[in-house]
Image (cartoon, grey):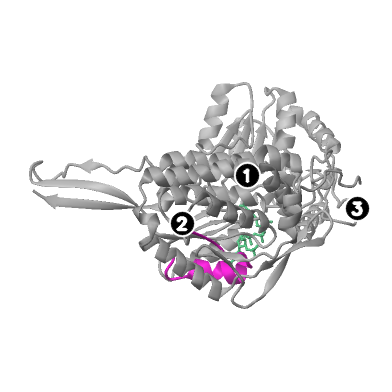
């Protein structure tokens, strides 16, 4: 394996070496316990930085700061236009510090630096700008009462910020997930306590500095790094939090829901997936094959919407499997800082072991790896892009979310056969369809129980496109104007005239 040849930005070296505190009420403070936890470089397994470890006492301080900022101080007095300008400025500053953020993301998460530069960072900047525009477009309705003469009542609705919001995010797109959560909440006038994932806290902490530089008032955004079982659980259960927004595993999503029941806080959940990617025999095969490879191997398969169940019409099965396997074999698995890196390490040793465990279970149940199927080397958490065949609907590798670069390829006979097969999962996050027959594409899209369906493309994201899941893939939507419902309450005002 080649060694890293891109040198680290001096700002990044300084940031990584610094002592990392948490952001509460506009101040960078130690954990109340004085404890810290390590974050690792997944390309080497070495400690990158030590981070203040938030726990219940820190969550309490952060929620109190968010409550005070929500109820008094400059934030609730600010006009929507002023608020929008500050949110826009965060986008501008992300662009200003783009290289530094991309390097932090690559170091902490393992993804190729070129991908962080081309996708994570610009998408995060765009997200803040998109929601900056929404700050001035919050509207209610005037409503005529059905049972009273029009001149007797004047009734209308107001959309108001939901209040103090807890946001718990994962490690697969650390900066972008922070942007998905923070931007709409800020635009709607909420205040926030954000908990980044323990594996990847660095870009969220740097974003905290950027948020301060943008001029967001103290206490509006608080960032408490720490473990899910302690800091995360305390946030989800906190009685003074009005809403919790979570992205992560379905298993933890259910825990969040239970914890939120104490004060019946509002809950939105963006959870796991096992997305079908369907290739019909009338598809443009070159496009479909490279699209199917991208659908699973992008971000090392660590995507909730990864096209992890590849369904191929039976007469082209061998050709497509062969094509996707050839793509897999050309992927250069290297440290993220290597300019030739197409795929970096998985985020952690735990994740690598989980993915390797799934590959072993698939083989034990009779699946065959056409390519891949093992770890790469013995340093860092690298796994080979893997294509499994001889799989069936009952196997763990077909039913459970692997969250690694592993696709199961299965044949199907026609459009009527593929819909029930595709929907045979507890999840319903995304799906892909590859065909030249536009009528068939839309007919199948309508029948798939999935929050997003891509036709002749995959992994196309835009702040304007709502994203979220059917079934156990979640509650509510991120992005688009739909996400604004997560961060607002509707108040009806009815006046007798
Ligand atoms: P988790 O769901 O555990 O982590 C997501 C976030 O939730 C992290 O910030 C985590 O904290 C936090 N968390 C964990 N436990 C609790 C809790 N009891 N209360 C509140 N917050 C909590 O995902 P993992 O990192 O363990 O990954 C496991 C699997 O989850 C993956 O293999 C994948 O299948 C799925 N996943 C799905 C993602 C998605 O985008 N939908 C993203 C990440 C994972 P911390 O990690 O800091 O301790």
**SS under mark 2:** loop
Mark whose residue sits in front, 3 or 2? 2
Residue interval drawn in magenta: 221-241
Residue beneath the point at 51% across and 39% down: 129
First of labels 3, 1 by sequence position: 1
Task: Give me the C-alpha separation between circle 3 and circle 2.
Answer: 48 Å
Mark whose residue sits in front, 3 or 1? 3
**Residue 5 point in image, percent of width and height:** 86, 44
Task: Give me the C-alpha separation between circle 3 and circle 1.
Answer: 28 Å
Whether residue 111 is in magenta: the answer is no
Residue at the spot of label 1: 305
Residue at the spot of label 3: 377
Residue at the spot of label 2: 217
**Residue 433 point in image, percent of width and height:** 62, 32
Horizontal placement of 207 versus 150: left or right?
Answer: right
User: Does residue 173 lie above or below 328 as drawn?
Assistant: below
């Amino acid at each position: 394996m080649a060694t890293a040849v891109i040198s680290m930005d001096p700002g990044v070296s300084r940031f990584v070496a610094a002592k990392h505190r948490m952001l509460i009420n506009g101040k960078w403070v130690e954990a109340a316990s004085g404890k810290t936890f390590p974050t690792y470089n997944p390309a080497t397994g070495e400690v990158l930085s030590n981070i203040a470890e938030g726990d219940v006492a820190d969550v309490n301080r952060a929620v109190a700061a968010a409550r005070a900022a929500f109820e008094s101080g400059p934030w609730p007095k600010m006009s929507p236009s002023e608020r929008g300008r500050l949110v826009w400025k965060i986008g501008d500053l992300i662009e200003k510090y783009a290289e530094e953020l991309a390097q932090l993301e690559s170091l902490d998460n393992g993804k190729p630096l070129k991908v962080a530069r081309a996708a994570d960072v610009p998408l995060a900047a765009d997200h803040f700008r998109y929601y900056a525009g929404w700050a001035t477009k919050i509207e209610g309705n005037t409503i005529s009462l059905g049972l009273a003469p029009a001149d007797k009542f004047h009734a209308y609705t107001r959309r108001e910020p939901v209040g103090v919001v807890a946001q718990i995010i994962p490690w697969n797109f650390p900066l972008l997930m922070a942007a998905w959560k923070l931007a709409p909440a800020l635009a709607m006038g909420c205040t926030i306590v954000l908990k980044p994932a323990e594996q990847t806290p660095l870009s969220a902490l740097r974003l905290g500095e950027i948020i301060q530089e943008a001029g967001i008032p103290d206490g509006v955004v608080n960032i408490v790094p720490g473990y899910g079982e302690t800091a995360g659980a305390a946030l989800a259960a906190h009685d003074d939090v009005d809403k919790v927004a979570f992205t992560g595993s379905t298993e933890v999503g259910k825990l969040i829901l239970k914890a939120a029941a104490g004060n019946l806080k509002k809950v939105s959940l963006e959870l796991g997936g096992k997305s079908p990617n369907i290739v019909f025999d009338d598809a443009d095969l070159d496009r479909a094959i490279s699209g199917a490879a991208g659908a699973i191997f992008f971000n090392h398969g660590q995507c909730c919407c990864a096209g992890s169940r590849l369904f191929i019409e039976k007469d082209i099965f061998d050709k497509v499997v062969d094509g996707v396997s050839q793509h897999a074999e050309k992927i250069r698995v290297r440290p993220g800082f290597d300019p030739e890196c197409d795929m970096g390490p998985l985020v952690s040793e735990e994740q690598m072991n989980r993915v390797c465990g799934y590959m072993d279970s698939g083989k034990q149940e009779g699946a065959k790896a056409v390519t891949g199927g093992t770890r790469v080397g013995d340093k860092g958490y690298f796994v080979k892009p893997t294509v499994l065949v001889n799989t069936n609907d009952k196997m763990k590798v077909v039913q459970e979310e692997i969250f690694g670069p592993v696709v199961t390829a299965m044949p199907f006979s026609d459009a009527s056969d593929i819909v029930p097969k595709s929907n045979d999962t507890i999840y319903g996050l995304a799906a892909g369809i590859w065909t030249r027959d536009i009528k068939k594409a839309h007919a199948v899209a309508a029948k798939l129980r999935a929050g997003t369906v891509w036709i002749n493309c995959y992994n196309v994201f835009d702040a304007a496109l709502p994203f979220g899941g059917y079934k156990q893939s979640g509650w509510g939507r991120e992005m688009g104007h739909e996400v604004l419902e997560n961060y607002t309450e509707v108040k009806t005002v009815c006046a007798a005239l």
